[in-house]
Image (cartoon, rainbow, N blue to C red):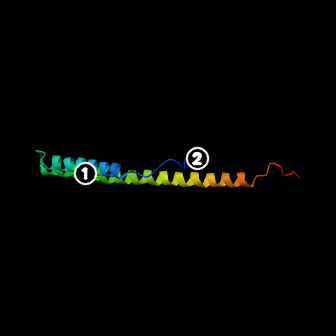
């Protein structure tokens, strides 16, 4: 199974859409926490929760990306090994 023809590059429009939607979601969450009619310590707790959730999301995305890149590299190495074995194989060679 050869996956070399599958495009892996993200388009600029998709990247822009993801960045804008993330920015809007984070901004609305920050504004909601700021204008929430509660005591300041509750607001601070929700703000820290939002900050932790945001950094955790970035960390998870990086881990998933790294795992996907490692899997792709391993698949390429395995495919190169199989290609080399098939190229070196001579079906008409006499077995001693």
Mark 1 is surrounded, within 10 Å at the Cα level, by few (under 14), some (14 to 19) or many (20 or more) other residues, namely: few
Residue 36: where, in percent of width, then height? 13, 45
Residue 88 point in image, percent of width and height: 74, 55
User: Measuring 84% from the left and 52% from the top, which residue is drawn there?
Assistant: 93
Depth order, front residue of 24/60? 24
Q: Is residue 89 left or right of residue 56?
A: right
Pointer 1: what residue?
23
Q: Nearer the viewer, mark 1 or mark 2?
A: 2
Q: Quadrant of the N terminus?
A: top right
Looking at the image, which is closer to me, 71 or 1?
1
Tell which of 87 and 58 is nearer to you. 87
Which residue is painted at 24% across and 47% down in the image? 25
Count neighbours of disc 2 (C-alpha within 10 A) and say few if under 14, some if 14 to 19, many if 20 or more.
Answer: few
Callouts 1 and 2 close, C-beta under 8 Å: no
Q: Nearer the viewer, residue 52 or 58?
A: 58
Residue 67 % position (x, y): 48, 52
Residue at screen point 53% across, 52% down: 72
Circle 2 residue? 2
> Which mark sits nearer the N-terminus, 1 or 2?
2
Find the distance from the CA under tag 1 to the CA under tag 2: 37 Å
């Amino acid at each position: 199974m050869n996956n070399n023809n599958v495009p892996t590059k993200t388009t600029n429009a998709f990247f822009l859409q993801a960045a804008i939607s993330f920015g809007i979601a984070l901004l609305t969450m920050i504004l909601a926490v700021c204008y929430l009619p509660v005591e300041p310590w509750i607001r601070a707790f929700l703000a820290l929760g939002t900050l932790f959730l945001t950094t955790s999301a970035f960390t998870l995305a990086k881990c998933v990306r790294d795992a996907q890149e490692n899997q792709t590299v391993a698949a390429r190495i395995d495919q190169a090994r199989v290609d080399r074995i098939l190229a070196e194989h001579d079906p008409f060679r006499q077995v001693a």
